[in-house]
Image (cartoon, rainbow, N blue to C red):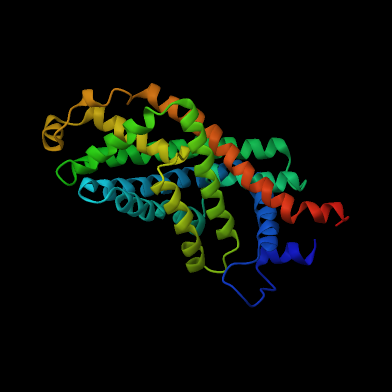
């Protein structure tokens, strides 16, 4: 293995300079990480993917808390606040260590480099997606059973309903386009985190892109795996006192249900795949393909 490859694995040979490694070093680290993820033992991958779903769901719940009563704030300020707190999810994934479907679309770099086969990459992405979903839904259920929707005199539950209804009612085209843009920003956050030298550096580079995607109202499939089910649970199972406190009723949310969940996740997942592949392929072309052409 080359010295660059060893440095990407171990972090040895760090140069003096900025807190984030240069793009070429990040590309090499992304290749190695993609190879590692594609070859991961399936039970380990499943556990780490379930954890990623849990972590992103925690970020989603934090987002809903920030949105409770957001009508009293200017729209932009409320959205930015929601984005900042939602960053918790990806921070837990990347600093704590977990396998997130959307970020793992960067495995395209390892595939393009010939370091991971197409079938292992698809297998790893599929396992991550399914277990992300299970982990996300588990937290949505726990949050509902814990009565989180009643917090703030029903304000958190009302925010969950509004958020889930908006996402469930998106058309295929807007959801697809939103999914592309969202995962470009998520993968840029992951890319920068791969180049960070410390946990603090990772946090600093993760927050701005994640804040941007959430504040812009873009669509992230794994986030929606908890946000939509939680809103659906509130609609289907909240007690009458919730509806009285929140000042709304179930009929206000006609799109919210299983059909709305599927109608959102299908185009958003496709868009997330496209967005992640675009980012990974662009950086592979810029920093790794010329090496291949020169007979590296």
Locate residue 277 relative to residue 254 in the image: left or right. Answer: right
Locate residue 153 relative to residue 58 in the image: left or right. Answer: left
x, y percentage for residue 218? Answer: 44, 41
Q: Residue sitting at 65 percent across and 60 percent down?
A: 26
Locate residue 67 relative to residue 243 in the image: left or right. Answer: right
Please identify the residue farthest to the right as the structure is shown. Answer: 295
x, y percentage for residue 160? Answer: 28, 38
Quadrant where the image shows the C terminus: bottom right
x, y percentage for residue 176? Answer: 51, 32
Q: Looking at the image, can residue 39 be seen? A: no
Which of the two residues, 162 or 41, is positioned nearer the viewer here?
Answer: 162
Q: Residue 125 falls in which quadrant of the image?
A: top right
Q: Looking at the image, can residue 125 be seen? A: yes
x, y percentage for residue 112? Answer: 74, 45
Q: Is residue 29 above or below residue 219?
A: below
Q: Residue sitting at 30 percent across and 51 percent down?
A: 78
Task: Tally the numbered discs.
Answer: 0
Q: Is residue 72 above or below residue 133?
A: below
Which of the two residues, 171 or 3, is positioned nearer the viewer here?
Answer: 171
Which of the two residues, 3 or 82, is positioned nearer the viewer here?
Answer: 82
Q: Residue sitting at 49 percent across and 43 percent down?
A: 182
Q: Residue sitting at 38 percent across and 56 percent down?
A: 84
């Amino acid at each position: 293995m080359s010295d660059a490859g060893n440095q990407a694995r171990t972090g040895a040979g760090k140069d003096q300079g900025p807190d984030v490694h240069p793009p070429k070093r990040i590309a090499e680290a992304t290749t190695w990480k993609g190879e590692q993820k594609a070859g991961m033992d399936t039970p380990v991958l499943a556990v780490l993917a379930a954890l990623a779903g849990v972590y992103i769901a925690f970020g989603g719940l934090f987002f809903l808390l920030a949105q409770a009563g957001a009508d009293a704030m200017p729209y932009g300020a409320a959205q930015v606040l929601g984005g900042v707190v939602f960053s918790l999810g990806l921070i837990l994934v990347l600093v704590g260590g977990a396998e997130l479907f959307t970020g793992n679309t960067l495995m395209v770099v390892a595939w393009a480099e010939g370091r991971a086969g197409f079938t292992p990459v698809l297998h790893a992405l599929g396992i991550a997606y399914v277990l992300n979903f299970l982990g996300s839904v588990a937290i949505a259920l726990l949050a509902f059973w814990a009565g989180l929707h009643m917090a703030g005199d029903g304000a958190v539950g009302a925010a969950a309903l509004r958020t889930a209804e908006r996402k469930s009612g998106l058309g295929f085209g807007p959801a697809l386009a939103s999914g592309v843009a969202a995962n470009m920003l998520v993968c840029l956050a992951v890319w920068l985190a791969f180049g960070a030298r410390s946990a603090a550096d990772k946090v600093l580079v993760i927050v701005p892109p994640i804040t941007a995607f959430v504040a812009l109202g873009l669509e992230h499939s794994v986030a929606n795996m908890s946000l939509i089910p939680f809103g659906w649970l509130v609609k289907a199972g909240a007690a009458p006192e919730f509806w009285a406190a929140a000042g709304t009723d179930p009929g206000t949310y006609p799109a919210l249900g299983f059909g709305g969940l599927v109608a959102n996740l299908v185009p958003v997942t496709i868009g997330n795949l496209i967005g992640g592949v675009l980012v990974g392929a662009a950086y592979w072309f810029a920093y790794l393909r010329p090496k291949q052409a020169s007979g590296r």
